[in-house]
Amino acid sequence: MGGGWPLDRLSSHVSVYLMQGQDMWWSYWYFHFTNYAFAVLFWTLIGRFMFSIFLPPDSPNYIYRWFRRLTDWLMRLVAYITPSMVPPLALAPIAAYWVAMARIAFFMVLYAAGLTPRMAQ
């Protein structure tokens, strides 16, 4: 039989897995950082929309103020390209939609170029 204690083999597999995980992160840092930025922007827009349902635009709530501060640049752009008949309250979900589409397009371009992490073979 031989082969040593099963936990020894398990720990070597775990260390190999951890090394591969670290390598996967830093090998594709440009993908992960950009993907994370898109995700943060998307969820900040969703949070901004949820806050805007319950709070006035000049609310002293510090979280809502920061959500507005982080997303105002995108909201101005979306307001410019969105028809004026759309109510201002709907601009945040529309902006979130465009961020989600940009995130998907970013992934598709990098995937087609072979620059994204792949599943183990």
Image (tube, grey):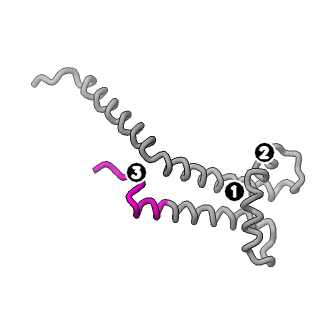
Q: Characterize the local packing of mark 2: few (<14), some (14-19) or many (20 or more) Cα atoms within 10 angstroms.
A: few
Element assignment for label 3:
loop
- Indicate yes or no whether the magenta region holds residue 120: yes
Cβ atoms at labels 3 and 2 below 8 Å apart: no
Quadrant in which the N terminus appears: top left
Q: What element carries label 1?
A: helix
The chief SS type of the magenta part is: loop
Residue at x-position 38% and y-position 34%: 18
Check whether the beta carbons of the residues at disc 1 and disc 3 lie within 8 A of each other: no
Q: Which of marks 3 and 2 is in front?
A: 3
Is there CB contact under 8 Å for labels 2 and 1?
no
The type of residue carrying mark 2 is Ile
Q: Which amino acid does label 3 sit on?
A: Pro
Q: Which residue is drawn at 59% across and 62% down?
A: 100
Q: Which of 95 and 24 is in front in this view?
A: 24
Q: Which numbered disc, 1 or 3, marks the residue that appears first in the sequence? A: 1
Give me the C-alpha separation between circle 1 and circle 3. Answer: 27 Å
Name the residue beneath numbered marker 1: 46
Residue that label 3 marks: 117
Depth check, front residue: 62 or 32? 32
Instruction: Answer with left or right where residue 10 lies relative to residue 39.
Output: left
Amino acid beneath label 1: Ile
Q: What element carries label 2?
A: helix
Q: Point out the residue furthest to the left here.
A: 1
Camera-side mark, 1 or 3: 3
Please indicate whether residue 85 sits to the left or right of residue 119 in the image: right
State the extent of the magenta-drawn residues as a range: 107-121
Q: Is residue 79 left or right of residue 34?
A: right
